[in-house]
């Protein structure tokens, strides 16, 4: 990563509040992510993790506070405008197009790309070689793990600067979990990709993240290094979510 980019703040939330109707969920969230970082968000169910990602991506409106991306205030940008600016999102449940083929799913992802479709897909398939054998198969016919790989690949076809991942290991076999870790680390290094990850699998979040934010009752309460996630005290605190 070039020295003029590394270390600069790419994504930042300040006093961010959000919720559903009159029900507040996020309570003055403050954090920042530097370009090229891989940051995890850990917390029990109901603490606001998915709400945070939905607010950051524009799928849920901000009630107060600001979101800045690449130096620009995007608080009032639509989800589409944020995606075009370079914010990729892989939601919980993956949300691929089940009746479209794998290739067609990837072509949809290329709609946000500034490069040629054929070139983009060829490069993405080198990162996700498991998908090469399934290009003509409907996305819904893939296993859960293969669908997650497709969702990641489709997102990366758009050339995002940051990818927000919501529970990417949910319902996935261990062999593909390891594959996802290796692939994301490789992509992050090759493309200076920034990753913001919500995950309850403690081994996964510790393996992929460079630092981890703890979200409790809708606010970031502290930051921890990934190596202590599997310490007995942390396992006890987060028992039942892994």
Image: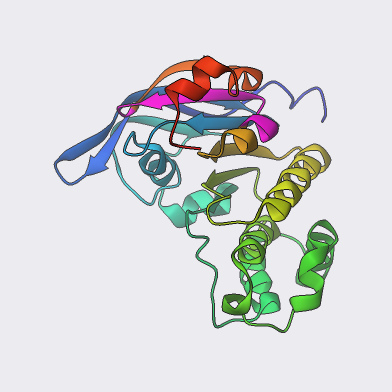
Does the rendering let one see residue 139? yes
Q: Is residue 131 above or below residue 202?
A: below
Quadrant where the N terminus sits is top right
Segment colored magenta: 206-218
Q: Position of residue 94 (x, y in %)?
A: 53, 60
Q: Position of residue 229 (x, y in %)?
A: 58, 23
Residue at 67%, 25% (x, y): give it. Answer: 210
Extreme residue toward the left, this view: 22
Q: Is residue 20 above or below residue 115?
A: above
Q: Position of residue 111 (x, y in %)?
A: 62, 67
Q: Position of residue 211 (x, y in %)?
A: 61, 23
In the depicted view, which residue is nearer to us: 240 or 114?
A: 240
Residue 16: in magenta span:
no
Image side of residue 151 versus residue 6, left or right: left
Does the rendering let one see residue 116? no
Q: Quadrant of residue 156?
A: bottom right
Image side of residue 37 versus residue 3, left or right: left
Q: Quadrant of residue 188?
A: top right
In the depicted view, which residue is nearer to us: 192 or 137?
A: 137
In the depicted view, which residue is nearer to us: 115 or 185?
A: 185
Residue 207: in magenta span:
yes
Image side of residue 36 versus residue 138, left or right: right
In the depicted view, which residue is nearer to us: 176 or 20?
A: 176
């Amino acid at each position: 990563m070039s020295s003029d980019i590394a270390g600069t703040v790419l994504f930042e939330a300040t006093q961010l509040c959000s919720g559903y109707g009159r029900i507040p969920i996020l309570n003055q969230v403050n954090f920042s992510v530097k370009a090229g970082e891989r940051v995890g968000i850990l917390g029990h169910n109901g603490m606001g993790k998915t709400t945070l990602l939905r607010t950051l991506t524009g799928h849920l409106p901000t009630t107060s506070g600001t979101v800045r991306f690449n130096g620009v205030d995007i608080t009032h940008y639509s989800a589409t405008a944020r995606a075009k600016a370079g914010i990729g999102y892989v939601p919980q449940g993956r949300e691929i197009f089940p009746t479209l083929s794998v290739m067609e799913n990837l072509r949809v992802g290329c709609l946000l790309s500034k490069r040629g479709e054929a070139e983009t897909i060829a490069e993405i398939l080198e990162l996700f070689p498991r998908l090469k054998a399934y290009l003509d198969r409907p996305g819904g016919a893939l296993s859960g793990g293969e669908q997650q790989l497709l969702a990641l690949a489709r997102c990366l076809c758009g050339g995002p600067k940051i990818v927000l991942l919501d529970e990417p290991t949910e319902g996935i076999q261990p062999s593909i979990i390891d594959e996802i870790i290796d692939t994301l680390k490789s992509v992050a290094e090759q493309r200076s990709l920034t990753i913001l990850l919500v995950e309850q699998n403690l081994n996964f979040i510790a393996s992929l993240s460079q630092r981890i934010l703890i979200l409790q009752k809708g606010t970031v309460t502290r930051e921890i290094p990934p190596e202590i996630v599997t310490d007995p005290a942390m396992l006890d605190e987060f028992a039942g979510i892994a």
